[in-house]
């Protein structure tokens, strides 16, 4: 073995829920030079990869192979021989019907060092998320994991149907949806009672999870009527009868709701995480992109002249971020702000400011510009210099009202919002195929940009059966001006308020 050969980590990426990834697997992804992932490995895990890491997709599904297994094996060898450490992400566990053993043998043959990082297999996790324990002392004390299809080039099957049929073990078949009828036929032909409970769990542990149940006698028809396809596992045994009592994952309040997130990707994580926790399937189609101003000079000049200001008013977390980014870039720190008083719109903006060690002097009762004006009514602001760093395109009411109260307002652009159209085709396709339950709008610009993505389409018609959720009345007014009527409006006008409003809406349904 050459000394500059890299190492390959055969990693179990888990069953689909990114939260089920092991700590060791995460560490391997974070340090890898190359990440090779397959169809069943959650793409969210790629966010742990280094920005300079090479990302290679080698997914295989239903006979459609990006690369054959032999070529995948050689790819791992070649990358390691280049001196690179490779994270090979495989759905579930690499040694449970994952061909991890074959890949390890190939690496060994070429003198490539490797490690195996076990993962959570769908054989136990998908049933668990469906409320089916694979063992239970009142039903069975053992379980069998069985491949749903054998190698096509095998001369003789090793499937012991007579043993499977007579056993009281829970039978878990992986990758067997296409062979369901054959599995059922063989089990019953060898004596398995026709009323034995059966469940199929598709996309187990993800918000796309779909579970159907029946018996050996009925399950083929049930699956056909449900249109259930791969990837799914098959569970056969009396433990399936516990699902009705123990189901928990698909009873979450927003389970299965497909919700479009239009917020800028950098800001969407909190909303996505909470909606996902509540069971929703979040579809991120950002309609805006947050960027530094094309002309940074006005903000930079204002920071050079901070001594002239008495008040700094911040209207968003973006305003906070870009103000402090520019402050630090100028070689200054928070000591330059010691003489200032601060006002914020909203608790999240206040919290972001507090991250820099500064407590806001004013926090309005509601989270819109009018409320900031009301909050200043008890403050002597006449003749005071106010710095207002915010978006290039913003409502004019705040600077106008503060000026009317006698303040000397310097409004400077701290950031700009740009149209993000990367998801246009995906959005239109989903709308035309009834693939969306709700769309969330977190600002007026997300609404107007969203409608820009539908240019050339009949937007209101496409959205006729879609729940539109607005973060507040200003955003709702923008939607109405574009022919849309929000069914959900947050109160208070915050991300948590928006989530609560969605919960209330679907609770009423």
Image (tube, rainbow, N blue to C red):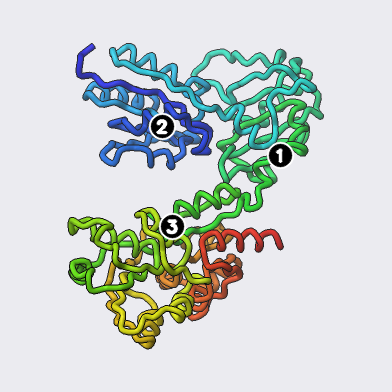
Q: Are marks 3 and 1 in contact (CB under 8 Å)?
A: no
Furthest-bottom residue in view? 404
- Mark nearer the N terminus (3 vs 1): 1
Give the residue at mark 2. Answer: 26
Secondary structure, mark 3, is helix
Label 1 crowd bin: few (<14), some (14–19), many (20+), radius 10 Å:
some
Label 3 crowd bin: few (<14), some (14–19), many (20+), radius 10 Å:
some
Secondary structure, mark 2, is helix
Which of these two is toward me, 392 or 99?
392
Q: Nearer the viewer, mark 1 or mark 2?
A: 2
User: Which residue corresponds to the image point at 30% horizontal and 38% vertical from the top-left?
Assistant: 50
Which of these two is toward me, 385 or 19?
385
Which of these two is toward me, 45 or 313?
313
User: Which residue corresponds to the image point at 22% horizontal and 70% vertical from the top-left?
Assistant: 307
Residue 493 percent location from the top left of the image:
53, 68
Secondary structure, mark 1, is loop
Residue 169 percent location from the top left of the image:
72, 18
Question: Which corner quadrant of the image does residue 304 belong to?
Answer: bottom left
As drawn, 19 above or below 445:
above
Give the residue at mark 1. Answer: 247
User: Which residue corresponds to the image point at 42% horizontal and 28% vertical from the top-left?
Assistant: 25
* Quarter the N terminus occupies: top left
Give the mark count. Answer: 3
- Label 3 and label 2: CA atoms lie apart by 29 Å
Question: Which corner quadrant of the image does residue 324 belong to?
Answer: bottom left
- Mark nearer the N terminus (3 vs 2): 2
**Which disc is residue 351 wearing?**
3
User: Which residue corresponds to the image point at 30% horizontal and 73% vertical from the top-left?
Assistant: 310
Residue 210 percent location from the top left of the image:
63, 43
């Amino acid at each position: 073995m050459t000394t500059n050969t890299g190492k390959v980590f055969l990693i179990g990426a888990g069953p689909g829920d990114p939260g089920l990834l092991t700590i060791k697997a995460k560490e391997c992804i974070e340090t890898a030079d190359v990440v090779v992932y397959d169809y069943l490995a959650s793409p969210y895990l790629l966010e742990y990869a280094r920005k300079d890491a090479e990302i290679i997709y080698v997914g295989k599904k239903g006979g459609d192979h990006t690369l054959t297994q032999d070529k995948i094996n050689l790819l791992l060898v070649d990358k390691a021989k280049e001196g690179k450490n490779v994270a090979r992400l495989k759905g579930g566990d690499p040694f449970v019907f994952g061909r991890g053993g074959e890949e390890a043998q190939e690496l060994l043959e070429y003198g490539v060092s490797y490690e195996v990082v076990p993962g959570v297999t769908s054989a136990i996790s998908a049933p668990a998320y469906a409320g089916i324990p694979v063992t239970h002392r009142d039903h069975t004390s053992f379980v069998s994991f069985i491949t749903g299809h054998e190698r096509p080039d095998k001369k003789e099957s090793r499937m012991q149907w007579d043993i499977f049929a007579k056993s009281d073990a829970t039978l878990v078949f992986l990758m067997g949806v296409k062979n369901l009828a054959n599995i059922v036929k063989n089990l019953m032909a060898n004596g398995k009672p026709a009323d034995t409970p059966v469940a199929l769990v598709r996309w187990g542990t993800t918000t796309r999870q779909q579970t159907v149940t029946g018996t050996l006698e009925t399950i083929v028809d049930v699956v056909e009527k449900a249109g259930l396809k791969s990837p799914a596992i098959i569970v056969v045994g009396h433990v399936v009868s516990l699902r009705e009592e123990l189901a928990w994952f698909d009873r979450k309040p927003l389970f299965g709701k497909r919700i479009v997130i239009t917020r800028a990707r950098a800001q969407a994580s909190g909303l996505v995480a909470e909606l996902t926790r509540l069971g929703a399937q979040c579809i991120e189609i950002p309609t805006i992109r947050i960027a530094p101003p094309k002309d940074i000079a006005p903000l930079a000049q204002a920071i050079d002249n901070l001594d002239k200001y008495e008040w700094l008013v911040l209207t968003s977390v973006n305003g906070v971020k870009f103000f402090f980014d520019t402050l630090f870039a100028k070689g200054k720190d928070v000591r330059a702000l010691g003489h200032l008083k601060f006002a914020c719109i909203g608790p999240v903006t206040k919290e972001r400011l507090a991250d820099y060690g500064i407590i806001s002097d004013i926090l309005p009762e509601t989270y819109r510009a009018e409320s900031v004006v009301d909050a200043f009514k008890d403050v002597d602001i006449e003749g005071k210099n106010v710095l207002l760093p915010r978006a290039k395109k913003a409502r004019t009411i705040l600077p106008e009202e503060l000026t009317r109260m006698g303040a000397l307002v310097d409004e400077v652009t701290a950031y700009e919002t740009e149209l993000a159209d990367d998801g246009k085709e995906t959005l239109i396709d989903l709308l035309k195929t009834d693939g969306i339950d709700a769309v969330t709008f977190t600002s007026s610009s997300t609404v107007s940009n969203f409608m820009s993505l539908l240019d050339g389409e009949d937007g209101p018609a496409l959205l006729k059966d879609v729940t539109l959720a607005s973060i507040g009345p200003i955003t709702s007014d923008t939607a109405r001006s574009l022919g849309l009527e929000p069914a959900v409006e947050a109160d208070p006008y915050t991300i948590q308020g928006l989530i609560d409003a969605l919960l209330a809406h679907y609770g009423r349904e």
